[in-house]
Amino acid sequence: MTAKLVNAVSIPNLPWEERPAGSSDVLWRSARNPIIPRNLIPRANSIFNSAVTPFKGEFAGVFRIDDTRRVMNLFRGFSMNGIDWQIEPAPIAWQCSEPEIAPFMYRYDPRVCWLEDRYYVTWCNGYHGPTIGVGYTFDFETFTQLENAFLPFNRNGVLFPRQINGKYAMFSRPSDNGHTPFGDIYYSESPDMVHWGCHRWVMGANLSWCYTKVGAGPIPIETSEGWLMIYHGVLTSCNGFVYSMSAALLDLEQPWKVIYRAAPYLMSPQMLYECVGDVPNVVFPCAALVDGETGRMALYYGAADTVTGLAFARVADLVDWVKAEAIR
Ligand code: BMA
């Protein structure tokens, strides 16, 4: 059965390139990669693991930029075509009414989720260790910070784009205070975007290409066949971590239940800009734009913790791939 997108908006100006002739890849890279160089704005050391969303007929994004002091922070940017970006040179100034959590320690790996009436942003937020920061904006001008979703240590907080059974829903990945050598994906619910509970285990780091840890990537994509979750996974080689990505289909009403999970990776670091950089051998997906009309997907991912790449797929083909390659 061909998967149909559910609740997907039309994005007529979605960035898109056809699959290269001779390729049978279900996900293929932009010929223009890396679309965002490490030094697009002054004093940037690297611009990577970043999230974009349709905005007023064009595109807006929240970008992870590590500066030349190696301070990790979030910046906003705008684009007419999703490829050429204007990123503001100053970091986002979050408004926060709670003085205990307002002070900046570090912020990285944002995701942006259109939900009900606003754009929510989640990120890895320094609060005596990494945890999940949550905030929102209506206009990409004013940004409001809410309570951290969880206690430290946690990373890869990814919201669902609608309430599920009357509750907000989020993936996260409990971790430690360093370069965590473990990590499974969990699902949590909230009645108010502040208090999170009813935690459910989704999936573990138990495949060869990701036996160290896994973490949710873009906002999950709702299809007639289930939630399409793209996630990163990490293998520990004798030369360090290797970050690849793959995909799974989750139950629409109980998303902690995995229906199909592909056994192979979907994309691993193979291009020079993915294999060489501040952290070699990393592809790290944080956002997927999907056009409801055509089912085309544009996937944004960090490469080698240095630059930002773009890749393309058709959602129905990706769903078919997950099923065909599923763990049996
Ligand atoms: C993770 C996070 C990501 C990063 C990855 C590879 O722990 O810090 O931001 O891309 O490591 O270094």
Image (cartoon, rainbow, N blue to C red):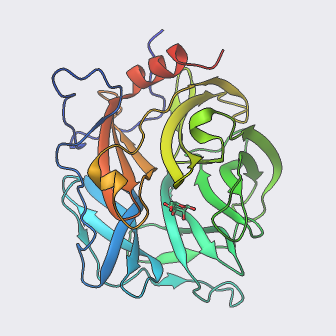
| Residue 93, placed above or below residue 123 | below
Q: Residue at x 78, y 58 (%)?
A: 196
- Left or right of residue 226: residue 221: left
Q: Position of residue 124 (x, y in %)?
A: 59, 67
Residue at the location (72% across, 88% down)?
100
**Furthest residue toward front:** 238
Observer-nearest of 173 and 252: 173
Most foreground residue, 189 or 165:
189
Left or right, 147 with respect to 36, comes to: right
Q: Nearer the viewer, residue 65 or 76?
A: 65
- From this view, report whether residue 197 is shown above or below residue 311: below
Would residue 19 be seen by someone viewing this image from the given angle? yes
Q: Look at the image and tell me whether residue 56 can be seen.
A: no
| Image: 214 above or below 120 | above
* Image label count: 0
The percent coordinates of residue 128 (x first, y second) are 72, 81
Give left or right: position of 193 versus 46. Answer: right
